Image: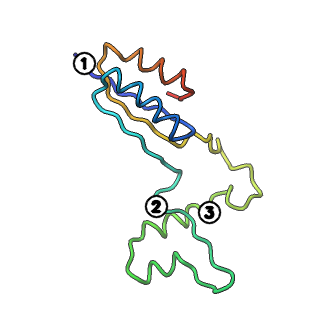
Amino acid sequence: MAEKNILAYFKSPEQAEGVARKLNALRVEEISIDRFSRYAGEGYNPMNPVTGNISSLAAVTQDASMTNQSAGILAAADPAASGLSHGGQGGPTGHDILLTAVVNESIHHQALRIIEEAGGLI
């Protein structure tokens, strides 16, 4: 039988884990749950006002990867970072948990129904 892929977004890991248990009962081929954010890496680490240490710059001087610094720069440059903006185009939806499943075609519609009933976005 053919396989189908499903990408579903949830507001909490608990929601996604509940759906994953139900999908496992249907004998899905593969399933994973991951959290994602707008920017890769650890995100924005502001300067400590007491000591003056800037953690993102310290990481660069210690030959750390540039990924953390780049993620911090992107997060700080976002219009939503200042608190003076509504967040720009679209804004966050709160659905930052991604459930990825590979299912047989025969149970695809049933799996989609389970996800939608649990509040997931497909």
Kindly identify the residue that appears in the image at 27 percent across and 22 percent down.
Answer: 3
Which mark is first along the chain, 2 or 1? Answer: 1
From this view, report whether residue 119 is shown above or below residue 37.
above
Which residue in the structure is indicated by mark 2? Answer: 41
Residue 79 has which mark? none
Q: Residue at x 45, y 20 (%)?
A: 112
Indicate the quadrant where residue 80 lies: bottom right
Report the side of 39 relative to 83 (left or right): left
The outermost residue toward the right is 84
* Residue 5 % position (x, y): 35, 27
Given residues 105 and 75, the one toward you in this image is 105
Q: Earlier in the sequence, mark 1 or mark 3?
A: 1
- Amino acid type, mark 3: Ala
The residue beneath circle 1 is: 2
Cα–Cα span, label 1 and label 2: 36 Å
Which element type, helix, strand or loop, lies under badge 2? Answer: loop
Is disc 1 placed on a helix, strand or loop?
loop
User: Which residue corresponds to the image point at 30% horizontal and 32% vertical from the top-left?
Assistant: 30
Tag 1: Cα neighbours inside 10 Å, few (<14), some, or many (≥20)?
few
Judging by the rendered image, the residue that carries numbered circle 3 is 77
Callout 3 secondary element: helix
